[in-house]
Image (cartoon, grey):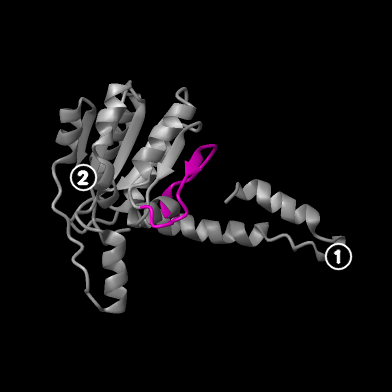
Amino acid sequence: MGDVGVTARALLAALPEGHRPEDQRPDIARRRAIWQLEKANRQTDDRGDGVSGAALFDSCTRLVPDDAVIAVDVGNNTYSFGRYFECTRQSVLMSGYLGSIGFALPAAIGAWAAAPERPIVAVAGDGGFGQYMAEMTTAVKYGMNITVVLVNNGELGRISSEQREERQMVWATELHNPDFARYAENCGALGIRVTERSQLDDAIGRALAHPGPALVDVVSDPKLV
């Protein structure tokens, strides 16, 4: 595992002069323009079952500071983050999908310990967060400035998607969740529940500005990934 920019430059420098790749930036720019239009259209998707991933991470793109460290979990929440969040100078921590559901909050705690002066954001699904949610009390105890963006779709969304694709519903994937915003408040953190797209900017902005741990519980549509 390494920084893709460092790795790509090292590989390029090692290539013989006659084997340098052609400049693909014009084609990439064309494809990016097509994707940007598609992404903008997806931001308004609404089936009445929760906020779309495109809308959520559009708000995060505009509001998360450039110097933030973002720890991401595994599952559809991270698929949506990868599709729709536009990185600038943020550092992104991920587990490499090595059977590591629940990675986001513990990784965010580690990032805070290493760089407490930087904004720390954890992007988690409800399944992953549920495995380590007691660590909110640790964040409160030590006054960790961590913002948890919780993609709450009421199920293990990635596993549901894979089973639908295979047309074999083998495992039960629905979840029985608490009110995560109230849970965060009970721990002593700031908790905000979001049920509509129009609430996103205010909720995420308040959480990022809060001087301590905060959780934004975003009720999400499991099919608008």
Q: Tell me the quarter of the picture where residue 203 sits.
A: top left
Q: Amino acid at mark 1?
A: Gly
The quadrant of the rendering that contains the C terminus is: bottom left
Nearest to N terminus: mark 2 or mark 1 = 1
Vertical comparison of 99 with 180: above or below:
below
Q: Position of residue 213 (x, y in %)?
A: 30, 28
Q: CA distance from mark 2 to mark 1?
A: 55 Å
Q: Which residues are magenta?
A: 83-100
Q: Position of residue 28 (x, y in %)?
A: 60, 59
Q: Who's the residue at 58% across and 60% down the image? A: 30
Residue indicated by mark 1:
18
Near mark 2 (Cα within 10 A), the count class, few <14, some 14-19 or many ≥20, is some
The verdict on residue 86 being magenta is yes
Q: Who's the residue at 37% across and 49% down the image? A: 73
Mark 1, secondary structure of its residue: helix
The answer to the question of whether label 2 and label 1 lie on touching residues, with beta carbons closer than 8 A, is: no
> Is residue 69 toward the left or the right of residue 5 in the image?
left
Residue indicated by mark 2:
196
Q: Amino acid at mark 2?
A: Glu
Of 28 and 13, which appears nearest the observer? 13
Q: Position of residue 123 (x, y in %)?
A: 36, 43
Mark 2, secondary structure of its residue: loop
Of 23 and 33, which appears nearest the observer? 23
Identify the disc placed on residue 155.
none
Name the main secondary structure of what is drawn in magenta.
Answer: loop
Of 179 and 170, which appears nearest the observer? 170
The verdict on residue 8 being magenta is no
Q: Position of residue 183 (x, y in %)?
A: 16, 35
Residue 121, can we see it? yes
Q: Who's the residue at 15% across and 29% down the image? A: 186
Near mark 1 (Cα within 10 A), the count class, few <14, some 14-19 or many ≥20, is few
